[in-house]
Image: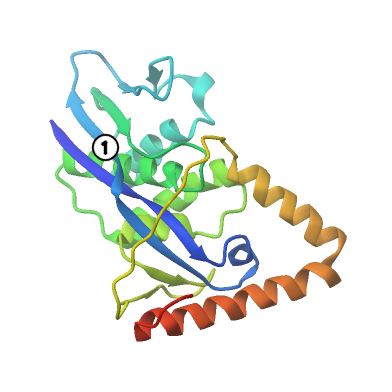
Amino acid sequence: MVEASAPAKVILFGEHAVVYGKPAIAVPVSSLRVNVRVIESEQDGIAIVTPLLNEVLRVDDTDVDNNPLVTAVRYTLDALQIQQANLTLQITSQIPVASGLGSGAAVSAAIVRGLAQQFGRALEDEVVNELVFEVEKLYHGTPSGVDNTVIVYEQPVYFIKGQPIERLVFSGEYRLLIADTGKAALTRVAVGDVRKLYEREPERIQPVLDEIGEVVLQARLALEAGDSLT
């Protein structure tokens, strides 16, 4: 048996605007994690078991082709060039689902790393990041890539879509309070709503996105200098 885990994440600055090429600052939340156990099985094929679902997923079933968990397993096996395996993946999570904390990317990252460990393969962070990003497209449609990046590298990042990753080092020590309303809200829906608004009124929304980008830059300078954000 092998185990792998991945953290949650929060976007401190740049939410939504990051989809449109503006910068964002995101940090991992290591106190909230997804854990994946990979256990050898006597049954043929790969099964996914998790309290998040009321059923056992079989990776070789065709009726789960669009399931992100199954897709993460399939993409990883392809990357590892594994044709057949008899395994059970047990997934547990401390991360609230549909709460903007990156639960989908975290599950995918833990699956990729768990399977790589099971087969004695070391995947570079860049490869893991690419695999998780492909799965993210099932969750969000047109993701920015910030979730998978901060979760895979597990470091604060200054992220601009399509540009090299910039890892941030904060000069000061900051405490972050995260409040969960308990109300689920799918990121795909929120991103889609913003997209519709942008396409309908670009002359009104573009200045807002530009201003968000400026706020992110100011926040970066403050964090790197150890200044207060108040």
- Residue type at mark 1 is Asn
Q: Quadrant of residue 184?
A: top right
Between residue 57 and residue 178, name the one nearer to us. Answer: 178
Q: Quadrant of residue 203?
A: bottom right
Number of other residues with Cα within 10 Å of mark 1, as a class: few under 14, some 14 to 19, many 20 or more: many
Residue found at x 36% / y 22%: 51
Q: Position of residue 75 (x, y in %)?
A: 40, 41
Q: Position of residue 145 (x, y in %)?
A: 50, 59
Left or right relative to 183: residue 11: left
Between residue 98 and residue 176, name the one nearer to us. Answer: 176
Residue at the disc numbered 1: 35
Residue found at x 49% / y 78%: 219
Q: Position of residue 118 (x, y in %)?
A: 17, 38
Q: Is residue 151 above or below residue 225?
A: above
Q: How is the image coloured?
A: rainbow
Residue found at x 52% / y 83%: 218
